[in-house]
Amino acid sequence: MALEFKFLKPEEISSNGAKPHMRFTLDLLANGAPITITHEGPEPLKGLYNSINREAGIFPELNDWQTQNGTKERRKVSVVLALNGHQSRGDAEAPSDVEAGIRAYLEALSKLPKYEQLSLL
């Protein structure tokens, strides 16, 4: 299964006068079929990671997630995943921690044996 994705710009939303929060959307291409994953509310990375896992049918353990020294314009994130005795690391830079975290997560996911064909747009 090959996954490709495009990270769409987060939208600030609020409902019923609640405290504003963000909606994050990923457009994925899995085996040629388009899939849109949206998460709004708290813990955007956890929500997006869980949605990606469901769509990919793979449920690795998130062993480590770290932000690294970056600039205000470029955030650096490192992710370590484990699955069935295999461990993989993904590193990415992007304008936000959330986008860098998603890119790093997908890079680490692509290094797990079942998903070596995963690609990023």
Image (tube, rainbow, N blue to C red):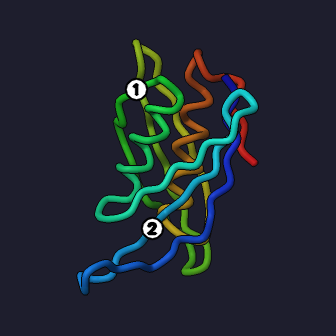
Residue 20 placed where, x, y %?
33, 82
Tag 2: amino acid? Arg
- Which one is earlier in the sequence, the residue at label 2 or at label 1? 2
Q: Quadrant of residue 39?
A: bottom left
User: Few, some or many C-alpha atoms within 10 Å of disc 2 (few <14, some 14-19, many ≥20)?
Assistant: some
Residue 56 placed where, x, y %?
53, 28
Q: Which mark is residue 87?
A: none
Distance from the alpha carbon under mark 2 to that under mark 1: 23 Å
Q: Nearer the viewer, residue 34 or 102?
A: 34
Q: Pointer 2 and pointer 1: residues touching (CB < 8 Å)? A: no
Secondary structure found at label 2: strand
Q: What residue do we see at 51% from left, 29% from top?
A: 88
Please, which residue is most extreme toward the bottom here?
17
Q: Nearer the viewer, residue 8 or 104?
A: 8
Q: In the picture shown, does residue 31 fall above or below 66? A: above
Q: Which mark is residue 23?
A: 2
User: Few, some or many C-alpha atoms within 10 Å of disc 1 (few <14, some 14-19, many ≥20)?
Assistant: some
Q: Quadrant of residue 72?
A: bottom right
Q: In the picture shown, does residue 71 fall above or below 27? A: below
User: Depth-wise, is mark 2 or mark 1 nearer the camera?
Assistant: 2
Tag 1: amino acid? Phe
Q: What residue do we see at 64% from left, 51% from top?
A: 27
Residue 24 placed where, x, y %?
49, 63
Q: Which mark is residue 59?
A: 1
Q: What residue do we see at 34% from left, 36% from top?
A: 63
Q: In the picture shown, does residue 97 fall above or below 103? A: below
Secondary structure found at label 1: loop
Q: What residue do we see at 58% from left, 54% from top?
A: 26
